């Protein structure tokens, strides 16, 4: 019987260590991060990253031959749930998005030379990367519309285009750029991916776009979303990842694990907000007792617990399917949890925020920041609507219209069929009357 909800004791020990480490070493960073610049932040991280490496938890998303731990998605899910409790934890564990997804691209599509030059130092934590696909002028939900061009001239490609929301672009050493190489090819064969060193002439990092999550203009810090102009950027043809026209194929391979890793981390964020909600329920006196004695707050707690439990099981199920049947087989499960998990994340934080009243709305608590962070989950790696559409299409492909135009459940038709099936019994009944 293969159904099992237990964690191996040795791995549970690792998870317990990670929980203590994240609480004791990472959560304090949150309280002073605004006072630190990136070099100071790097100094804090360096010894922490060494501890994670010594513990055998570094870059857990990759196979051992690539310097990772080869945990597979289920174990990774359990670890990511812990790391999700702080936006600053994944960087200490070598699995910070977008570096984690980019290392997977390089692992899947990189040549031995590309792996040596970019993947190995990326995994060692010596380089940072960004993924540069979305453009302000075209729909990120439909990247077949991309306009950024890469034109081949001899042994080089010349890239021209305008991107934004390239997360970590302003601190990245290299960018993975998605650009159209053949505008006349079939839509999903038009684009290719290129590794572009950030200091290549023509790469202009214009700004980190101020967002709901980081409302004040900042530049050059972990978690920024860069707007980038590529003007006459020349890269060697050897910097192309995979064959020409394989950009979408590679992107899909990156996005499946990337999406579920987000969902895993959201469980940790939701759990932290939930703990705040429950703590508040124990002591805040309102008319009629403490908050936890009020039915609406009890409903929030029960509904949040149910939603979080559902999201956790859906995430781990999708992870299990990826481990046992491959990422493509888990497409529907990943889409389901991507939009469902984003909704749960939002709802739980919203209730925790509401339970804290003005304090929840203030920046004296991290809940308002979690709330702003959570809103983005409904956009990145595909907006909710696109995932719902994809799930609905896959489900509908298993259905067809009834031949007579009447619903299969239409009772008059079923009754007629049942009367024929049970004619003998029914006849006897009538004869006995
Ligand atoms: C925090 C954050 C980080 C990001 N990081 C990166 C990154 O590192 N690299 C990168 O390249 N991009 C990144 N992005 C961009 C992200 O991938 C895009 O925002 C996303 O793909 C949506 O594209 P868009 O913003 O152009 O919206 P559009 O494609 O213009 O869509 C707008 C809205 O239209 C609706 N919509 C779209 N399609 C459909 C449909 N088929 N049916 C019904 N409604 C639909 C949805 O509600 C959607 O939100 C990031 C975005 C955010 C918010």
Image (spheres, helix red, strand yellow):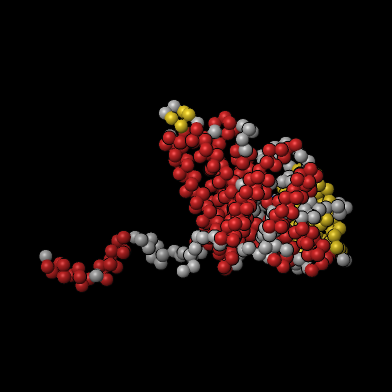
- Farthest residue toward the top? 287
Percent across and percent down for residue 161 are: 79, 52
Q: Is residue 360 left or right of residue 197?
A: left
Whether residue 384 is visible here, answered yes or no, is no
Q: Is residue 395 left or right of residue 133?
A: left
Whether residue 360 is visible here, answered yes or no, is yes
Percent across and percent down for residue 355 are: 52, 35
**Residue at x-position 18% and y-position 70%:** 427
Picture layout, residue 242 above or below residue 26? below
Q: Quadrant of the C terminus?
A: bottom left
**Residue at x-position 71% and y-position 38%:** 32
- Farthest residue toward the left? 433
Q: In the picture, residue 367 is in which quadrant?
A: top right
Q: In the picture, residue 295 is in which quadrant?
A: top left
**Residue at x-position 61% and y-position 47%:** 85
Q: Is residue 200 left or right of residue 328?
A: right
Q: Is residue 418 left or right of residue 396?
A: left
- Farthest residue toward the bottom? 424
**Residue at x-position 78% and y-position 68%:** 111
Percent across and percent down for residue 333 are: 54, 59
- Which one is in front, 41 or 150? 41
- Which one is in front, 301 or 403? 301
């Amino acid at each position: 019987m293969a159904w099992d909800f237990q964690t191996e004791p040795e791995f549970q020990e690792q998870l317990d260590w990670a929980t203590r480490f994240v609480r004791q070493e990472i959560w304090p960073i949150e309280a002073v991060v605004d006072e630190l610049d990136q070099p100071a932040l790097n100094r804090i991280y360096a010894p922490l990253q060494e501890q994670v490496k010594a513990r055998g938890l570094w870059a857990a998303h990759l196979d051992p031959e690539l310097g990772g731990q080869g945990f597979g998605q289920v174990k990774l899910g359990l670890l990511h749930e812990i790391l999700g409790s702080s936006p600053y934890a994944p960087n200490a564990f070598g699995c910070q998005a977008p570096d984690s997804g980019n290392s997977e691209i390089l692992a899947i599509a990189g040549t031995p030379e590309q792996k040596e030059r970019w993947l190995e130092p990326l995994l060692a934590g010596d380089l940072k990367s960004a993924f540069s696909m979305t453009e302000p002028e075209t729909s990120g939900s439909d990247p077949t519309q991309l306009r950024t061009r890469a034109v081949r001239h001899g042994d080089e490609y010349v890239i021209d285009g305008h991107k934004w929301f390239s997360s970590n672009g302003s601190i990245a050493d290299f960018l993975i750029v998605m650009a159209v190489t053949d505008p006349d090819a079939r839509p999903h064969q038009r684009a290719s991916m290129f590794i572009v060193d950030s200091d290549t002439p023509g790469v202009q990092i214009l700004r980190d776009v101020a967002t709901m999550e980081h409302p004040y203009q900042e530049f050059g810090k972990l978690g920024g979303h860069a707007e980038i102009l590529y003007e006459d950027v020349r890269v060697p043809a050897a910097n192309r990842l995979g064959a020409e026209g394989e950009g979408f194929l590679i992107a899909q391979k990156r996005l499946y694990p990337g999406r579920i890793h987000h969902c895993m981390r959201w469980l940790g964020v939701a759990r932290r907000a939930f703990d705040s909600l429950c703590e508040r329920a124990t002591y805040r006196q309102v008319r009629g007792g403490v908050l936890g004695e009020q039915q609406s707050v009890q409903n929030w707690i029960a509904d949040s617990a149910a939603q979080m439990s559902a999201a956790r099981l859906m995430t781990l199920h999708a992870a299990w399917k990826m481990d046992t049947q491959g990422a493509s087989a888990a497409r529907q499960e990943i889409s389901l949890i991507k939009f469902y998990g984003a909704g749960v994340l939002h709802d739980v934080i919203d209730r925790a925020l509401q339970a804290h009243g003005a304090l929840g709305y203030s920046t004296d608590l991290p809940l308002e920041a979690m709330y702003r962070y959570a809103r983005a989950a409904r956009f990145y790696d595909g907006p909710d609507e696109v995932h719902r559409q994809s799930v609905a299409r896959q489900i509908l492909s298993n259905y067809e219209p009834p031949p007579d135009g009447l619903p299969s459940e239409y009772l008059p038709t079923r009754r007629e069929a049942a009367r024929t099936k049970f004619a003998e019994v029914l006849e006897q009944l009538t004869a006995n009357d």
